[in-house]
Image (cartoon, rainbow, N blue to C red):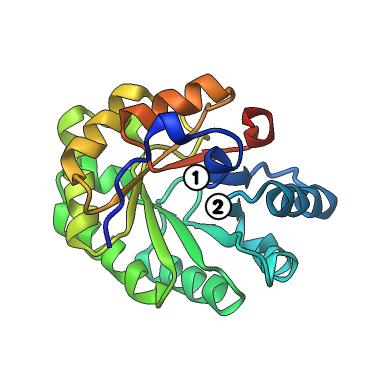
Amino acid sequence: MTFPAPNTADLTGPLLASVIDHTLLKPEATPGDIARLCEEAVRHQFKAVCVNALYLPEVARRLAGSAVAACAVIGFPLGAMPTEVKVAETRWVVAHGAQEVDMVIPVGLLKAGQLDAVRADIAAVKAACGDALLKVIIEACLLTDAEKVAACRLSAEAGADYVKTSTGFSSGGATVADVALMRQTVGDALGVKASGGIRTRETALEMVEAGASRIGASAGVSFL
C-alpha cells in the first residue's frame, strides 16, 4: 500500500472531507461533544473520528455501518510511558473497535539517540494494532530536522502506516516545512498526517500541497 498526497485541485467539498480526521482530544470533552463529533463526521463523510481512548467504544458504536473510521490516540500526549503500557492501551482500543491508532513516540529517547528503543516502541504498538492502521506522532516542534528525519525512518522501519506531525498539545503544531520534510523522507511508502493548529481551509490545503495525505483537525466542518 502507498500513501501519496492527494492533488489539491481535487479537494473540494466531499473530497477534502475524505482526508480529514475529525478530532476532539480536549480533556474537558463531554459525551455530548463526542456524539456531535460523530454525527458531523458521518454527515460530512470525514475519513475518521479521532478521540481519547475513554470515548473510543462509543465512537465505534456510533460509526458502525458508516465509512468513517474510529481512531484512538495512544500514549497521549507525552509518549513518555513504558512500551508495555502503550501496548496494553492499543490492544484495549482495538478490542473495542479502533480501526486506526495514533501513537506518540518517546520523544526524549529519540533526542538522546536511543534509536533502537524508539524503533522497538513503535514496532510493539504496530504488532498490537493487528489490522488497525498505525500513525506515529513525532511531535516535530520538539525536534531538529535531523531528528525529524530519524523519527520518520524509524517509523517506516517499525512498520508504521503514517507519520504525524504533532499532538497539538506541545509548543507548536503542523508546519508546511515539517510536512514537506516528512514527505520527502518517507516518499509514498507511508502517509503523512498534518495535525495541530490547522484551523482554516487555506491552511489545510497548504498542508496537502506540501505532502500531507491526512489532516487532523477539530475545525474540519468549516473547511468544506
Where residue 47 is drawn, which disc sits there? 2
Q: Residue at x 41, y 64 (%)?
A: 133
- Residue contact between numbered discs 1 and 2, judged by CB atoms under 8 Å: yes
Of the residues under marks 1 and 2, which one precedes in the sequence? 1
Is residue 45 visible in the rendered image? The answer is yes
Q: Residue at x 23, y 45 (%)?
A: 151
Residue type at tag 2: Lys
Residue 152: percent from left, percent from top: 22, 46
On-image quarter of the N terminus: bottom left
Distance in Å between CA atoms under marks 1 and 2:
6 Å
Q: Which image quadrant for residue 138? A: top left
On-image quarter of the C terminus: top right
Is residue 142 visible in the rendered image? The answer is no
User: So how many labels did they put on this image?
Assistant: 2
Q: Is residue 109 left or right of residue 52?
A: left
Where residue 192 is drawn, which disc sits there? none
Residue type at tag 1: Val
The secondary structure type at the circle numbered 2 is loop
Q: Is residue 46 above or below residue 65?
A: above
